[in-house]
Each structure stands twice: as C-alpha cells, then as structure tokens.
Image: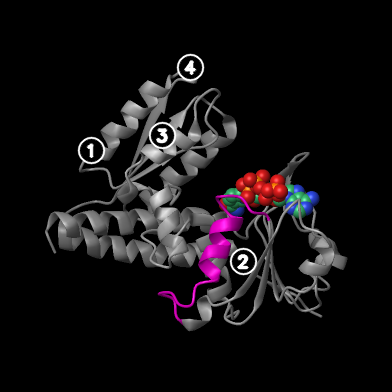
Amino acid sequence: MTVKLLSGTQLAATLREELKAEVSQFIDRHQIKPTLAAVLVGNDPASEVYVRNKHRASQSIGMNSQLHRLDSTASMHELLSLVNRLNADPDVHGILVQLPLPKPLDATSVLDSIHPDKDVDAFHPENVGRILQGRPRFLPCTPHGVQQLLIRNSIPISGQHVVIVGRSDIVGKPLAAMLVQRQCGYGPNAVNATVTVCHTGTRNLSEITRSGDILVAAVGQPRFITAEMVRPGATVIDVGINRVGDSLVGDVDFAAVSPIAGALSPVPGGVGPLTIAMLLRNTLVAAQLQATSRAGE
Ligand code: NAP
C-alpha cells in the first residue's frame, strides 16, 4: 500500500495566501489592521521560538503583531494587569499568552482573564463551552489544523470512526467536541464523526486504535503509535512533537506505520505548521467581530 503523505507545510502556505487576501480586503473595508498581541513571560528558549514564528507569520500576511515581555519573576498582579490593559485596548484584536508560564504563575487564572472576544487560542471557558454547543466563536488552533488537514485532502469525516489518543484541553478534548458535531461551516463531511477518546485509563488501547478509520495521536510520547495499533488503510494524524536527541519526532512510529496507513501526516511538516495558520485565522475573525460590534452591525 502506498501511503498518502498529508503535508501541513504545503497546506499552511495555501492557507496563509488565502488569509493574506482576506486581511487585505478587511483593511480596505474597515481601515483597521488586525493585531495580535503576544505575551511572553521569562525566556524559555522554545517559547521564544514559537513567539518569533507567530510574529513573523502575522507580519507576512499583513497583520500587526505586538510582543509584550515580562520578566520571569513577574507577579500574577503584573501579568493580569498587562492582560487587562490589552483587553481594554481597541487596537488589539487577539491576545495570546505563551505557555508554559514560569512557576508559580497560575496559567488557568491568566487564560480565564483574557476577554473571550480576544481569546484567539480558544482556551477561555466561554469559548470552550461554545465549541461544545456547536456555535464556536473561535476554533482551537491545533484541532482546527487537524480538521483542515483532513478536509483539504478530501478525507471524509462524517460517519467515520475517529479515535483520538490523548484528552488534553488543547488537543484531544476540543478536537473530539468539534468532530462530533452534527454540522459546521465547512459542510456536512467535515464533522458528524463517531469519536472515541483514549487516555491512560483506557483498557485494550490497541484494539480501540485499530478500529479507527481516522487515528489521531496527541500523546506526547515519541513513536507511541506502532504498526499493530493501526488498521490497514486508516488515516493517521500525528499531532505529537517530541525532541529526541537533535531531532523532532512525532507520537507515531512513522517508519513502521507508513506501510500500513492509507494516509499519514509527517513530523515535522504535518500538523505543526497549521497551528500558526489557524491562530492567524482566529485573529482575523476577532478583528471582524470587534469591527462589526463597534459599527453596531
Ligand atoms: P498532554 O497534555 O501531555 O496530554 C497527553 C495525553 O495523552 C493525556 O490525555 C494522556 O492521558 C494521554 N496519554 C499519555 N500516555 C498515554 C498512554 N500510555 N496511553 C494512553 N494515553 C496516554 O499533551 P498535549 O498538550 O495534548 O500534547 C500532545 C502532543 O502534541 C505533544 O507531543 C505536544 O508537544 C504536541 N502538540 C503539538 C501541537 C502542534 O502544534 N502540532 C500543539 C499542541 C501539542 P491522561 O489524561 O490519562 O494523562
């Protein structure tokens, strides 16, 4: 069986081109430049890279990007004051607080303090609830990237058994909530799946993963999904990013699974690049929402 490689790098470039055109139309119409404000506390090297990539990507599609830095010793009061200032700033449309935060800062309280209209990561409880109810304001970035990878490769979701390994608040749970909906803005084939979510409490994991038409790995363990866990011909989406020595590897054993899967996303170059593209999409959505509410439309 020849596996179809699901390239996120190529798709992210297409999505950025589409967004660039939409951003330009938005600016022409409203004379407002969509603006993303990133908050970085401390100097974690991986976070520095993520924030720099987001900054470059925003600028490349004609958006504004602000970086607000706080020292690693910053207090909760300082951080919450900064978020509140950004919440009140009409020139800021999207706010992201780069995680992880240095100890003892409490990420939950900080994320809860972001105004839901500016919560472009879709982590605020109000936005999570809206996703669950099938009326999202923003779609969470990584799950949205997974959904786009399937849609744009014409892999049907409706009626399929999607097995997700991992139940985190940023990947597994919101992805399950999105794909189980009856309908969504991307058409009838983009949702309406039968979804199973697996975790460390799951018994007979391999049996369940082998029953998936679509298998999503969001485990955080290098090469966790082996050939025996995959049904022949299944679509396998690897969300994992694990550093092993000098290289990045996914949660799927790529070499072992590629002869078995029908389609497979690589790491790097799979879901990773799509996450930033979806963040930029949310920043444009946020700017549109705020422009509309200001104009009283
Ligand atoms: P996480 O919060 O650590 O959650 C991992 C999940 O996997 C948990 O639900 C855990 O179960 C489950 N799990 C761990 N070991 C397991 C086992 N042996 N059997 C069954 N389930 C197991 O991870 P995350 O934040 O979702 O991230 C997952 C991976 O995706 C990481 O490699 C991360 O770097 C990557 N990631 C990539 C992107 C991207 O842009 N591509 C974005 C976010 C994350 P319990 O709940 O029972 O502990």
Q: Secondary structure at mark 2?
A: loop
Residue 238: x and y in percent read 68, 60
In the foreground, 182 or 63: 182
Q: CA distance from mark 4 to mark 2?
A: 40 Å
Q: Which residue was labeled with disc 4?
A: 73
Tell me the tag on residue 143. none
Is 219 left or right of 33, judged from the image as shown?
A: right
Asked if the residue under mark 2 is in contact with the one under mark 4, i.e. CB atoms within 8 Å, the reply is no
Location of residue 184 with respect to 280 vertically, above or below: below
Asked if the residue under mark 4 is in contact with the one under mark 3, i.e. CB atoms within 8 Å, the reply is no
Is 198 left or right of 58, judged from the image as shown?
A: right
Location of residue 269 with respect to 50 vertically, above or below: below
The type of residue carrying mark 3 is: Val
In the foreground, 214 or 15: 214
Location of residue 120 with respect to 188 vertically, above or below: above
Ranked by sequence position, the earlier of labels 3 and 4 is: 3
Q: Residues within 10 Å of mark 4 (few under 14, many from 20)?
A: few
Image quadrant containing the C terminus: bottom left
Q: Which residues are magenta?
A: 166-187
Ranked by sequence position, the earlier of labels 3 and 2 is: 2
Q: Farthest top residue?
A: 73
Q: CA distance from mark 1 to mark 3?
A: 15 Å
Tell me the tag on residue 7. 2
Q: Which residue was labeled with disc 1?
A: 88
Residue 221 visible, this orientation: no
The type of residue carrying mark 1 is: Ala
Q: Which residue was labeled with disc 3?
A: 39
Residue 45 visible, this orientation: yes
